[in-house]
């Protein structure tokens, strides 16, 4: 099969100036999640009609000072509104309805003083800030306004914490011994509180624009991209001893079942606190958090956070089945990338207990899938494989998908939707679902 090329990509630039982006007009219909058979689905709350989210991750990775490939889509002095408009115009023409973007947490996460030295701030602004950085929020609001004008919903990913005095201060005010590094984000009470505060503040900040109408264009708030803990950091580097965690319980690090429960319970606690904070501001909001499969890091499944897997990837993912059973998140976002000889989507997903999931309770969503050039050396086989991959996911119960990425060409080890006249986009555009 030769991919059909969607309308020339220059089309978007030609019509980029044809719309007004003052967030005028009625709010978009709110999208909600519901149980259904054979699998959960999304729907428009105003009409009860099924809604199938299709689209792209829109990611701008920029080198800032000595920090390489920062998520800088909305960074001050880097946000490109005309490029965003061209992309959204192409999205609208090709029948897509959802775009996923990353919020930059600021210096210290990426590297000390990179944004401070250039003024190209992320959401944190200067390190002494005691609020979210208003110029960054304005750039994000501009993007959401443009998306809303074209009937496209946005998923913002609120990665980690804003690296400024307010949120880091909250995080460090209530810590526990024997919890370190990124594990603290999910297992230390101050970090959990800081995340909930950040999530609430961000929703409030966006609600201040256009009388709150921009909230209607948010498909969901994603609390974190690919939730994981580090098995080589405390508490999981410990092989004995009792460790207290943010859920107020204690776990024996000598017992695999308790080590696993420490991850499961604390990720659920983290997710539920932030979801509640968001819904205090916007009761209609959907909230999610994504995961990668255990196979993605060389593991066959959950085993109590034991050492192992790919030694270059010391990550241990959250279990999606636990989030489905016990969290208040609205849907389950699992990322999949075909890799390795003999890859099958079912085998990949089953390392994350997919076969045991009740598919009817809430939607399954594939917020990232993509094509590595190591797996697909030329783009035509890649395009056909991506179409087949998406179709397989839907046949297994997934309710929507987003491709990684539209045009992040700096990631030259992957194929992107806009490359080679939109060859992959030609397969994925005008979804038939």
Image: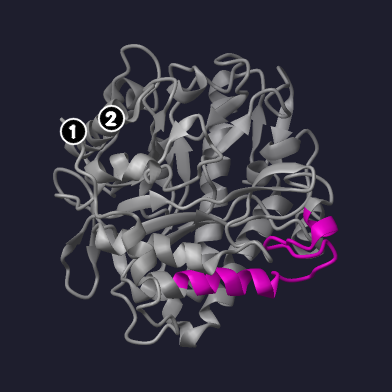
Residue at image position (58%, 42%) is 266
Q: Residues within 10 Å of mark 1 (few under 14, many from 20)?
A: few
Residue 273 figure quarter: bottom right
| Residue nearer the viewer, 430 or 133 | 430
Give percent across and percent down for residue 60.
56, 51
Q: Is residue 127 magenta?
A: yes
Q: Which residue is mark 1?
A: 2
Judging depth in this view, the residue of 77 and 357 nearest the camera is 77
Please say whether residue 205 is visible from this viewpoint: yes
Element at label 2: helix
| Disc 2 packing (10 Å; few <14; some 14–19; many ≥20) | some
- Mark on residue 215? none
Query: Where residue 62 sits in the image (x, y, percent)?
Result: 64, 48
At 56% from the left edge and 27% from the top edge, which residue is drawn?
316
Q: Residue at x 29, y 40 (%)?
A: 423
**Residue 339 falls left or right of residue 165:** left
- On the image, which quarter does residue 344 sit in? top left
In the displayed structure, 336 sits above or below 404; it is above
Looking at the image, residue 131 lies above or below residue 266: below
User: Left or right: where does residue 357 sit relative to residue 104?
Assistant: left
Residue 128 drawn at (x, y percent): 85, 65
- To which residue does mark 2 refer? 380
Task: Say whether residue 228 is left or right of residue 38.
Answer: right
Residue at horizontal 34 percent and vertical 81 percent from the top? 27
Q: Nearer the viewer, residue 247 or 104?
A: 104
Residue at mark 1 to residue at mark 2: CA–CA distance: 7 Å
Label 1 element class: loop
Looking at the image, residue 224 lies above or below residue 78: above
Q: Quadrant of residue 152?
A: bottom left
**Residue span colored magenta:** 115-144
Q: Are marks 1 and 2 in contact (CB under 8 Å)?
A: yes
Task: Answer left or right for 181 relative to 308.
Answer: right
């Amino acid at each position: 099969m030769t991919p059909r090329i969607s309308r020339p990509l220059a089309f978007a630039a030609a019509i980029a100036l044809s719309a007004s982006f003052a967030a005028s007009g009625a709010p978009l219909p709110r999208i909600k999640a519901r149980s259904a058979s054979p699998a959960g689905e999304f729907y428009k709350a105003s009409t009860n009609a099924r809604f199938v989210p299709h689209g792209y991750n829109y990611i701008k990775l920029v080198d800032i000072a000595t920090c390489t490939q920062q998520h800088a889509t909305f960074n001050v002095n880097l946000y490109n509104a005309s490029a965003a408009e061209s992309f959204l115009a192409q999205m609208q023409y090709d029948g897509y309805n959802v775009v996923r973007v990353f919020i930059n947490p600021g210096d210290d996460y990426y590297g000390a003083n990179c944004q401070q030295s250039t003024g190209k701030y992320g959401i944190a602004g200067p390190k002494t800030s005691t609020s979210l950085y208003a110029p960054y929020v304005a750039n994000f609001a501009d993007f959401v306004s443009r998306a809303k004008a074209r009937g496209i919903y946005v998923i913002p990913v609120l990665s980690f914490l804003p690296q400024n005095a307010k949120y880091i201060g909250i995080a460090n005010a209530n810590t526990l011994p024997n919890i370190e590094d990124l594990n603290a984000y999910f297992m230390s009470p101050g970090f959990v509180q800081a995340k909930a505060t950040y999530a609430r503040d961000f929703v409030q900040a966006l609600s201040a624009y256009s009388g709150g109408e921009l909230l209607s264009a948010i498909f969901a708030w994603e609390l974190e991209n690919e939730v994981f803990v580090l098995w080589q950091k405390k508490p999981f580097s410990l092989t004995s001893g009792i460790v207290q965690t943010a859920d107020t319980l204690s776990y024996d690090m000598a017992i695999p079942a308790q080590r696993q429960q420490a991850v499961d319970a604390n990720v659920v606690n983290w997710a539920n606190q932030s979801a509640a904070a968001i819904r205090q501001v916007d009761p209609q909001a959907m909230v999610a958090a994504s995961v990668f499969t255990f196979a993605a890091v060389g593991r066959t499944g959950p085993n109590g956070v034991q050492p192992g897997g790919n030694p270059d990837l010391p990550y241990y993912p959250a279990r999606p089945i636990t989030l489905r059973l016990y969290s208040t998140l609205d849907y389950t976002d699992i990322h999949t990338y075909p890799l390795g000889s003999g890859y099958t989507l079912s085998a990949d997903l089953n390392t994350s207990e997919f076969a045991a999931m009740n598919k009817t309770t809430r939607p399954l969503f594939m917020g990232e899938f993509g094509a590595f050039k190591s797996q697909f050396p030329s783009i035509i086989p890649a395009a056909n494989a991506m179409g087949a991959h998406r179709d397989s996911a839907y046949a297994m119960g997934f309710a929507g998908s987003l491709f990684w990425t539209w045009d992040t060409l700096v990631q030259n080890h992957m194929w992107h939707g806009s490359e080679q006249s939109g060859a992959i986009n030609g397969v994925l555009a005008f979804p038939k679902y």
